[in-house]
Image (cartoon, coloured by chain):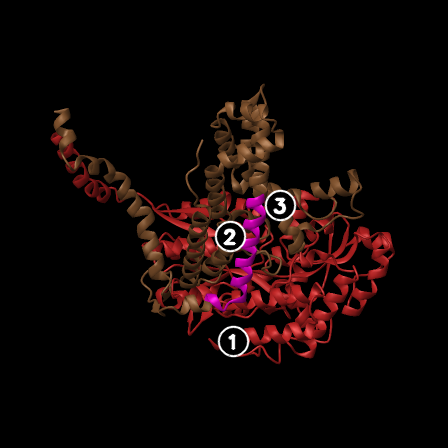
């Protein structure tokens, strides 16, 4: 027994020596993200891009850890709290301020010597979503926006010739589409989050807060914001828009691809999905129908951030640089991820691309959701108000008055 | 050697030690630590400051309408599912008890839902109750049986969403209640029934005056265990409705989870869980008192 203990002890003492001796071993860095495993983007990452990077940097091994979007924020927070976070993560642009406020992100503009050059190379809009309290905590990875997608089959069937250019024309198309039956809709969306509601609110001329993000009263409950929500409520209750917005009907994207829903607002990732699952379907696009505020859609996209806890900042930054390269950005463009590098728009790939044009055009006027650490909570208030209004349980003015007051309180904290 | 070992006072403790250590490490330490967290505005990130706020989290909970709604929902869930599980569990136990052929098979069939994973069956129920004509329940009620004129958006309204959640809770728990009741039924001496039959007692009379009194202790045990379980409902609600629509199907644990992991209010979440624990202890204590009667006599 004693001999065995002694042997174990000696082995334990020798272990660090063995590890130190194996310096040739590559460093492993983890990259957590929500690249969709069903669509081709994740495949591109693990089968093309990571191998490409590892070949250039044989001393670094990159482990890709995909998460479903809905679970990612909490999974990441929990891991970080337990000290088990990754080196790098791809964050939805709306999460960046929150993680920066938590103090877990590396201040890239301080730790990365070439940060300025990288920052100068990207679109300023997406870059700004990495800014919090005087510093940059990440770099943009991809950008996108929602455009109006319509289905040629439904349009032809009901005798509509062109997609709506204005909000009034959207409403006017209702009768024609409803002639097909109860379960056919002019438009469908799946919730009342900022992503869903803001294109309407902005297009009607409303907003959530003042430009300095100090208060919601006077903006979220303005006449224009109220008009937007009243319009949506009327459309949902009259059966023109799919009740999926209030959670009482199934996924509108599937309805769109199967010609039950004439139009949706969605992003460029819909093309690879259509190609894979509905190869006969041809997506038609136009700009968000205009209202009093113009044709305003919502900016989406992701940033790449590095965590301050990583023991391998140099290796992690190397991969971060790689994501900002032409190769990475062009390869990801093939999977529906719009590039954040303006220089690539001059390339033949973008010049001749079949469908990116409309998204780039919409991005010229699109706006970002409120860049604020409290956004998740603000959005919950907005989502709940939207549900109350669209379900017809509360008048738009009343619900938005209450919501504005609640968001004021959040912003005052 | 062996006898000497038995006489050393520390031997039993030595055998208890591993279990005790595990208990302290995995149960006691987290419990105490959570109590500590509940007095703070807790920052979960390692190395970051947390602010001591005393009882503020508890005060906040008592004035939070969402918490009261969640508590009411939890209590309703407990009442509905405990009654459902006990009635059905006892009913099935009586039937299975009488079966002479294939008793084990019936017992296994009814027990099967108990051992299935909550996650799997929650998704299954979410699918069964999905809205539109494609949902299986809708399909049966509308297209097959013609009981409803059009499909119901089960999970879109809180009133109908509860049906799905209650149904799952009862379906999944009946088997456990049945097995426990069955054991109790088998412990009743058959002579008692024979004597009662000779005295002219009917089926119902026998059940009412022999079976029920003799399984009293078991009934109490089943009830206490089910109520504690009912208050801890989480996975089914979290997965089937996510507390929606509009937080109307939120139960205490899902609300606690949402505050903690959604809003990062870990101190508040810890306070909520302590309030829930206090309620469960109180209710269990109350039951023990109410049901305490002189020992049953055969």
Q: Which mark is residue A71?
A: 2
Q: Which chain is red?
A: A
Q: CA distance from mark 3 to mark 1?
A: 36 Å
**Chain ID, mark 2:** A
Looking at the picture, does residue A378 appear above or below residue B157?
below
Q: Position of residue A249 (x, y in %)?
A: 71, 52
Query: Can you say which quadrant of the picture contains the N terminus of chain A?
Result: top left
The span shown in magenta is B61-83
Give the foreground label among 3 and 2: 3
Q: Which chain is brown?
A: B
Looking at the picture, does residue A404 appear above or below residue A170?
below
Tag 2 secondary structure: helix
The one nearer the camera, A323 or A153, is A153
Is residue B71 a member of the stretch shown in magenta?
Answer: yes
- Residue at the (48%, 68%) spot, across then down: A373
**Chain ID, mark 3:** B
The reply to whether label 3 and label 1 mark residues of one chain is no
Q: Residues within 10 Å of mark 1 (few under 14, many from 20)?
A: some
Q: Position of residue A300 (x, y in %)?
A: 58, 62
Side of A224 where B27 appears, left or right: left
**Chain ID, mark 1:** A
Q: Which residue is mark 3?
A: B126
Q: CA distance from mark 3 to mark 2?
A: 18 Å
Q: Residues within 10 Å of mark 2 (few under 14, many from 20)?
A: few
Side of B256 where A109 appears, left or right: left
Using the rendered view, name the quadrant where residue A245 is placed.
bottom right
The one nearer the camera, A207 or B161, is B161
The disc, 2 or 1, on the residue closer to the chain's N-terminal end is 2
Tag 3 secondary structure: helix
Q: Which residue is mark 1?
A: A409
Looking at the picture, does residue A43 appear above or below residue A400?
above
């Amino acid at each position: 027994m004693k001999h065995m203990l002694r042997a174990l002890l000696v082995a334990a003492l020798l272990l660090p020596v063995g590890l130190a001796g194996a310096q040739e071993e590559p460093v492993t860095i983890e990259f957590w993200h929500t690249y969709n495993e069903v669509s081709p983007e994740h495949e591109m990452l693990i089968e093309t891009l990571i191998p490409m990077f590892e070949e250039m940097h044989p001393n670094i091994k990159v482990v890709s850890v995909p998460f479903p979007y809905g679970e990612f924020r909490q999974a990441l927070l929990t891991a970080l709290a337990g000290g088990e976070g990754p080196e790098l993560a791809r964050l939805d642009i709306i999460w960046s301020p929150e993680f920066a406020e938590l103090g877990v992100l590396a201040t890239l503009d301080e730790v990365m010597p070439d940060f300025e050059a990288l920052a100068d190379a990207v679109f300023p809009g997406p870059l700004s979503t990495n800014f919090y309290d005087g510093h940059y905590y990440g770099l943009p990875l991809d950008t996108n926006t929602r455009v109006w997608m319509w289905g040629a089959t439904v349009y032809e069937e009901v005798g509509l010739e062109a997609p709506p250019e204005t909000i009034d024309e959207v409403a006017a198309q209702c009768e024609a589409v409803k002639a097909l039956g109860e379960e056919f809709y002019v438009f469908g969306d799946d919730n009342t989050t900022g992503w869903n509601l803001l294109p309407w609110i902005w297009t009607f001329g409303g907003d959530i807060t003042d430009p300095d993000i100090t208060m919601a009263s006077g903006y979220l409950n303005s006449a224009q914001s109220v008009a937007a929500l009243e319009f949506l409520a009327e459309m949902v209750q009259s059966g023109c828009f799919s009740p999926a917005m209030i959670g009482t009907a199934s996924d509108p994207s599937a309805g769109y691809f199967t010609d039950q829903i004439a139009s949706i607002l969605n992003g460029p990732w819909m093309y690879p999905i259509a190609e894979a699952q509905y190869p006969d379907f041809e997506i038609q696009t136009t700009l968000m129908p205009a209202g009093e505020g113009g044709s305003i859609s919502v900016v989406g996209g992701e940033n790449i951030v590095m965590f301050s806890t990583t023991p391998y900042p140099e290796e992690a930054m190397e991969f971060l640089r790689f994501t900002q390269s032409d190769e990475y950005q062009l390869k990801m463009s093939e999977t529906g991820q719009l590039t954040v590098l303006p220089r690539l728009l001059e390339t033949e790939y973008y010049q001749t691309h079949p469908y990116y044009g409309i998204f780039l055009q919409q991005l010229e006027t699109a706006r970002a959701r409120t860049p604020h650490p409290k956004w998740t909570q603000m959005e919950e208030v907005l989502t709940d108000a939207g549900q109350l209004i669209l379900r017809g349980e509360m008048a738009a003015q009343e619900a938005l008055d209450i919501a504005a007051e609640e968001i004021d309180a959040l912003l005052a904290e | 050697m062996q006898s000497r070992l038995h006489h050393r006072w520390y031997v039993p403790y030595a055998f208890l030690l591993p279990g005790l250590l595990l208990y302290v490490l995995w149960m006691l330490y987290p419990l105490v630590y959570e109590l500590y967290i509940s007095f703070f505005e807790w920052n979960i990130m390692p190395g970051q400051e947390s602010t001591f706020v005393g009882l503020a989290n508890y005060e906040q909970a008592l004035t939070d309408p969402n918490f009261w709604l969640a508590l009411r929902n939890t209590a309703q869930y407990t009442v509905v599912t405990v009654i459902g599980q006990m009635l059905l569990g006892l009913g099935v136990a009586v039937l299975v008890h009488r079966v002479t052929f294939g008793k084990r098979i019936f017992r296994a069939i009814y027990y099967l839902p108990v051992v299935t994973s909550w996650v799997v069956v929650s998704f299954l129920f979410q699918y069964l109750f999905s809205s539109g004509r494609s949902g299986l329940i809708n399909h049966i009620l509308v297209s097959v049986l013609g009981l409803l004129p059009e499909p119901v958006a089960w999970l879109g309204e809180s009133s109908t969403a509860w049906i799905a959640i209650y149904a799952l809770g009862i379906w999944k728990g009946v088997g456990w209640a049945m097995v426990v009741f069955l054991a109790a039924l088998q412990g009743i001496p058959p002579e008692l029934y024979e004597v009662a039959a000779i005295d002219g007692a009917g089926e119902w009379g026998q059940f009412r005056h022999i079976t029920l009194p003799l399984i009293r202790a078991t009934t109490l045990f089943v009830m206490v265990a089910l109520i504690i379980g009912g208050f801890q409902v989480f996975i089914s609600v979290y997965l089937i409705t996510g507390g929606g629509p509009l937080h109307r199907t939120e139960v205490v644990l899902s609300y606690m989870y949402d505050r903690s992991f959604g809003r990062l209010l870990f101190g508040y979440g810890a306070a909520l869980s302590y309030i829930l624990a206090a309620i469960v202890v109180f209710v269990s204590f109350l039951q023990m008192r109410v049901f305490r009667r002189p020992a049953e006599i055969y």
